[in-house]
Image: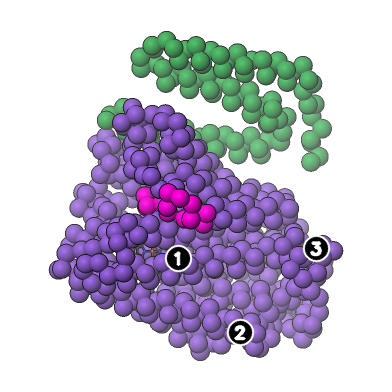
Chain colours: A purple, B green
Amino acid sequence: MANGKDTVAENFYNQSTNKHTGILSWLLTVDHKRIGLMYLYAILTFFVVGVIIGLLMRLELIAPGRQLMDAQTYNALFTLHGVIMIFLFIIPGLPAIFGNFFLPIQLGARDVAFPRLNLLSFYVYLAGAFLALLSLFLPGGPIDTGWTFYIPYSVRSTTNVSLAIFAAFVLGFSSILTGINFVTTVHRLRAPGMTFFKMPLFIWATYATAWIQIIATPVIGITILLVMVERAFGVGIFDPALGGDPILFQHMFWIYSHPAVYIMILPAMGVVSEIIPTFVRRTIFGYKAIAISSLAIAFVGYLVWAHHMFTSGMSDTARWIFSLLTFIVALPSGVKVFNWVATMYKGSIDPKPPFLWVMNFIFLFSIGGLTGLVLGSLATDIHLHDTYFVVAHFHYVMFGGTGTIFFAALHYWFPKMFGKMYNDRLARIAVVLFFVGFNLLYFPKFILGYMGMPRRYYDYLPQFEPLQFVSTVGSWILAGTIFFIIGYLIHALLKGKKATSNPWGGVTLEWHIPSPPPLENFKEIPTVTHEPYDFSQLKEMKDE
Amino acid sequence: MENHVKKHPGYSTYIFVWLALLAFTSITVTVAGIDLGNYTMLVALGIAAIKSVLVINIFMHIKYEEKIFKVFLLLSLFTLLSIFILTLFDIIYR
Ligand code: HEM
Ligand SMILES: [Cu+2]
């Protein structure tokens, strides 16, 4: 196979799956790699928009009193920021980009099971994004309910709630289609010899995630439809004024949205389980435990949703039961963290940028996870609910967790996806700047929340000013770093050195094929004989 | 797939099931007018459950499919059941 010398060879950039050339050959492609890249460009664009909205909110909050915008604008901005970051960035992020690109390759398949469905899911995603955009400009104005759409306000708000939540409905379909595709691919298209317990852990994680996408997403779908019916026809389902039950809405919302946090984090954990062995040159410790814990998290994740509702007025019995169950989910997550650390023990660590991003992840995600336990405890949550403590917590888990791994995955697989290398030194600087900016931006929010600063307010009491100011400065550093990263990656794309087929010394199947991979990935479907992280095969790979 | 040759039902079965579904729907509507107190929910859910068994088995062909699909379905149902039970801890004790 390729030695990195024949990179002028055919690859998926110059081979089309259809008769078109140019932009049409991309827009109509059914190649999983091209679809993955189209997702990357779309998702990255929305992410940048979300970051810019975050910056604007932080500017408003730099000092007490009105700075740039009125309260209503702030309400619309945090809603939009939340909707974009959740439904357009972090939920589809890793599965749709890196799952699409690498799941078939790591399995030894030529494509996903349903390539056309794959393209459809991309356009359904775009359609959902378009509807969300449209809802901003139609009369009525941008939705101002927060990304959680809580009843009764979402039934009474005169903004374009129905259209905006319908956008979330459509986006859900995209997610379901991706899930169905991945489950089928894993069951049907594994290469000969690729048994379930020889699959790379990223696949295990994506597989477990796919199941959540399939089973949980319909719940938010039906909930959204019910809210629309309630708004349009005044049927009393959730709004107490119409005879409905507002807490039922919260149940149904979180029956999806809690498992959805595992849609966000499980694939990220999968990426971590890929990167650590590669840069430690050592097989992963506790392979089966990590694989199974993904499934365990996927299941237990269904049983804890009401920890978001301790102050909603639900029954006391439900409150302590859900608090208890919440502590149980910490177990399978702990299994993973300990196995990762055990993998590094006595390994020969090569701290390249992807590995450094993973270190960032472990640190930030641990803070996010542990403060999650503070919120999961019934008593402390009563004090902290709906304060900045929660805002800090979910940014640490979603952004510090999945967001960080989004960058880790990008730095790990960039050479494979684009066939180019980025500047190692710039990448290291970015890791450090990201870490500094991130903690300056979000750590003060833990303290502010503890002091009583409520979330979703455009103004605050004077005693909060110093920490709010620090937080805003952090947002400049963090956003600056993100633009810096995008900048040097684009530079690498245009001017970077050619990447070899295996720049990091990884052993999973994607490192056996040229960078960038050819259409249909493999000349010949490989027969898998090694364990997924068996580094003794590096020698044979050298002569491939 | 290899064992996908199992017999599929004929049109008569489909029509019969369709009529049964219509019948159950009218029962649901009728029952909604009667005050069953605490049992309203139970009856409605019971009828809905029977209907979904019919749809899933016949229209969606699960009855004629490989075992793995049934396993998946049962696991999903088990998840749904857990969710129902947990929700009841709120509804019943509120
Ligand atoms: C530089 C990047 C970011 C900045 C400056 C930022 C800043 C903020 C601010 C100021 C708020 C509003 C707090 C409040 O008033 O309650 C907020 C809310 C939120 N952020 Fe971010 N954020 C950033 C990135 C992210 C990312 C990457 C995610 C998800 C992965 C995210 C998810 C959310 C969510 C879900 C909310 C809650 C919205 C709501 O209350 O409905 N943010 N963010
Ligand atoms: Cu949760």
Q: Is residue A164 visible?
A: yes
Question: Magenta includes A56?
Answer: no
Q: Which residue is mark 2?
A: A492
Q: Quadrant of the C terminus of chain A?
A: bottom right
Q: Is residue A301 visible?
A: no
Nearest the eye: A309 or A191: A309
**Neighbour class for label 2 at 10 Å: few (<14), some, many (≥20)?**
many
Mark closer to the chain start, 1 or 2: 1
Residue A151 x %, y %: 35, 40
Q: Is residue A508 left or right of residue A161?
A: right
Q: Is residue A437 left or right of residue A422?
A: left
Amino acid tagged 1:
Gly
Q: Which residue is mark 1?
A: A50
Residue at image point 31% right, 32% down: A240
Marks 1 & 2 on one chain: yes
Q: Is mark 1 within 8 Å of ligand 1?
A: yes
Marks 3 & 2 on one chain: yes
CB under 8 Å between callouts 3 and 2?
A: no
